Image (tube, grey):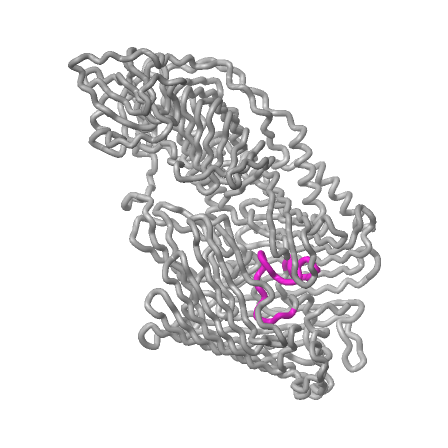
Amino acid sequence: MRIFAALLTAAVLIAAWSPRSAAQPIVGPPTPPPVLQVIPQTPTVTPPATAAPNQVLIRYAGQLLDVERGYVFFTTGDSFKLDPNAKIVDYKTKQPLSRPPGATMYADASFDKTTGKIVELAVSQQPIASAQSFDNKAAYQQIQKFAIAQSPVTANFDQRPNAYHGPPNTGRLVAVTFVVQVPPNTPLTDSVYITTDVANWDPRAILLTRIDALHYRATTSFRSGTIFHYKYDRGSFRTIEVGRDGMDDPPRTFTVREADALRRDDVVYHWKDESTGIGTQNIGPGSVPTPFNPNGILNLPTPPPGLGPTQVHTPPPGFAPAPPGGARGTLHH
Amino acid sequence: MGPAAAHRSQALLICEMQGLPASRTKHESHVSLRVLSGALVALAFSLALTAAARAQVTPPPAPTPAASAAPVPSAAPTLIPYVIPTSAPFSRINLDADSIEFYWNRYIIEATGHVRLQMDDGTLITGDAFSTDLRLNRFLIAGHVRLESKGVEYEGAAFSYFLNDGRSYFLPILNEPDRWTFIGDNYAVPYLGREIPPDAFLFPDLSHDAVFLTATSAVIWPLDALLFKGTRVHVLGMKAPGGQLYFNFSSNINFRQNSLVGAAVDVGYPFAGGRWWYSTLHARYDGGPNNIGAYLGFEQHFAWDNAYIVASLNPFDRPLKQANLLASDRLNRNLQLDTFQQLNYDQYGWTTPVTAAWFGSFAATAALHNSFVRLTYNLWNYGLAGNDPDHPTNLTFQWVGFDHQLHYLPLFFRLRSGAAVYDDTYGIGTFNGTRYTNLWSTFLGGTIYTNAIKLFNDTYFVASYDRQRTFFSLPHYLDQVTVTSSLSRLIGTKAAFSITYQNVNSGDYAGAQQLALYPPTTPPDPVTGLPMLGYAAYRGLATSRGLTYQLSYTPRPTLSASLTFAHYHDFPPPVGLVSGRPPYYFNADLKLRLTPQLSLELGRSYYFNWYGAKWSPQMLIQFGP
């Protein structure tokens, strides 16, 4: 009971201690939008535009960021002047809009080639399939000259002074082959996996196949530009690799660059559950069996082929011969 | 430099650049585990409850007062010196909107209608629509944007923040639209006309993705976690109320440490969390021989760059409970402390436990030049409830050397040695009528192995030899020799086949006392009850031989399979269903990626009717990301 009293006292003391995580401000109930609001000066949606008979139009379709104060902003970051008499309609019905156009909507804009202003804006909630979109460089260059900006564009040489200077990453799928050398005492029938933050550190994320007694291999695909962290394990965090110096090293890091295929060679020097001498056992939550952890399942390593219960308390050898299921390897109580 | 160290140094750099106290970095929360003891089993739970209670009473932050408008910058480009990229000056974003949608498969949040972003550095941004890619660590807010921060106010069409770079891009509307860049949180100095990444203001295409949940508000800890409130989870076309839901997507592996055991089925509900911690309620099920049924568990995580604490209580709705605590702290490059504490007790309600037993393990690992040492202390206390005063302990010291190549040969070796002391007042064992309450031992061992030696076309040979001798204070010594040789062949680029033979000889030598230590005996078979005649010849010398065939096949990155067949021949023979290995063993394992976000692993073993056992008790069926 004294130990329980000590536990309780310590619990109260810790509870009184204010950790940062507990003291972080907690978000309150949703607050109303700020009082100061920008009054949109978007032309009303009803006035139909009367294009001059000799007006030459250029069309461009894209997604909207904002329509405000007489300007239309596309997700390219470009802004264009909106003709005061511009016609703003629904893209499909060609009827006036029931609500002002705004962010995330899509629009098919018609530019007056002479003034550079948008004279018609057909708005849709769905992407507009059009050849005259940002993806079409020629179409985009035609209207980019109408974009409004006070400041001329200047290059940013300081943005990434040490940036990678290889081919730009396009996000293509790149086959990455991992080949790992495992410790010579790795159990022969164990599987080896890669756990990675890309898979939310699932300890069985990538299964490697054995190619010889010391090497395992796996090939998987990642998009170029992906930077991920990973470690090798044998199916759980209790059997994860540890560093050459016996300590938990930070995860390995790999950057998938633009290539047809990549290969990564690694060496695992020790496993966390590796016995390095005597008296050691696989200390962990499953070490002492209870009815609730009869065997390693789900989040624990599958025991080796034997069907027996998890070994519990290993007294040193050398005493009376171990009868089957007797003293050796079991609790002596 | 590892990612954690890089993150730390980057955080310090931010502090220096922003003039912030270092306490605003992760260092503030780094709690040394040196204060850990067995009492922490209960403390983590108290901490979680306290934090949750405080969360209920903490008032919402006061709204940012309106500030005077900032001066309009000149149209001329601002000349800036060389600028070191930095990360975002804030660590927490509170998001409120009319509607918030979370696309879990892509870790993207979209919000529309009266969007309000409140950062913990005081910056307030409002707008019509919001989008953030949590993996790319950037966000975009567009439509009637208003930015307030540290005495400046701007209005514009869109604002995009690349948090990894500490750069934000703004489309202000003054007399005309413009393009500005901000660096860090210095919104008073816009840099005009600088190049803006072409995708800075793009909304992601989510037309092929499904919404996982909708919410009314969210808290985002960039690169680490997010917490939704007022959620409705989209399941089978319905929207089920989900309450408060926490998601952790940190690259910090310490968040994934696990102290729960058992359970054939486990579904976690992460109902609370922050940047450094989270709490999960587990609904669990166990069938099996004990037929336990459904029960509840609770797990509490704390994680930092180089340390973690994870504690669990499982189950907490049954009298027989188990509390686990795992903690680790890498104090510096050369020293790491670990502890595992386990409390098993039988308690009805809040009454005094009927029985309680505690196991504690403490380990310290220190890196040396070309080797490391580890000191481990294990303690059992079976009498926490006063019904058993026995406290066996053991203390071990190990030295493990690095791998070294033997001259220029394709041979490598590693050495190890150590000592241990075992103590038990009730006696470790009895020999020749003497009860031994403590025992010493020392050991020396080593492994020599080849690398993969190419014999001929795609065929490789690997061998290893391991030997260890352990001396005990009770005069005897133990020798163990393990010899492994393997022949493997690559079959094209998609398959591999290997044959491995392993021989393990272990001998316990006591000289003239050999027969006293290992007298002839024929113990009864625990299954059949018949005397095990094979044991009659056992004098402490055992041999295990195993031949393993393995075929692995990976036709494509999304599918891999392996087949393993093993034949073991051991002396003394295995004891059916209790210990030892079955003579014949077959295992099949299949891993299949169903979708980019979902994989399936199937696996099961067959024992060829060994003591009536055919299939392994459990079939591995695991869905994963």
Above or below: residue A307 compared with residue B169: below
How far across and how far down the image is residue B521, in percent? 72, 85
B471 or B597, which lies in front? B597
B294 drawn magenta? no
In the displayed structure image, the side of residue B558 where residue B240 appears, left or right: right
Above or below: residue B245 compared with residue A40: below
How far across and how far down the image is residue A164, in percent? 32, 44
Q: Residue at x 27, y 45 (%)?
A: A167
Q: Residue at x 63, y 58 (%)?
A: A284
Would residue B115 be seen by someone viewing this image from the given angle? yes
Would residue B483 be seen by someone viewing this image from the given angle? no
In the displayed structure image, the side of residue B324 where residue A82 appears, left or right: left
Above or below: residue B563 compared with residue B540: above
B564 or B156, which lies in front? B564
Find the residue positioned furthest to the left: A54
Instruction: Specify the segment rendered in magenta.
Output: A284-308
Above or below: residue B46 compared with residue A277: above
For the stretch drawn in magenta, the main secondary structure is loop
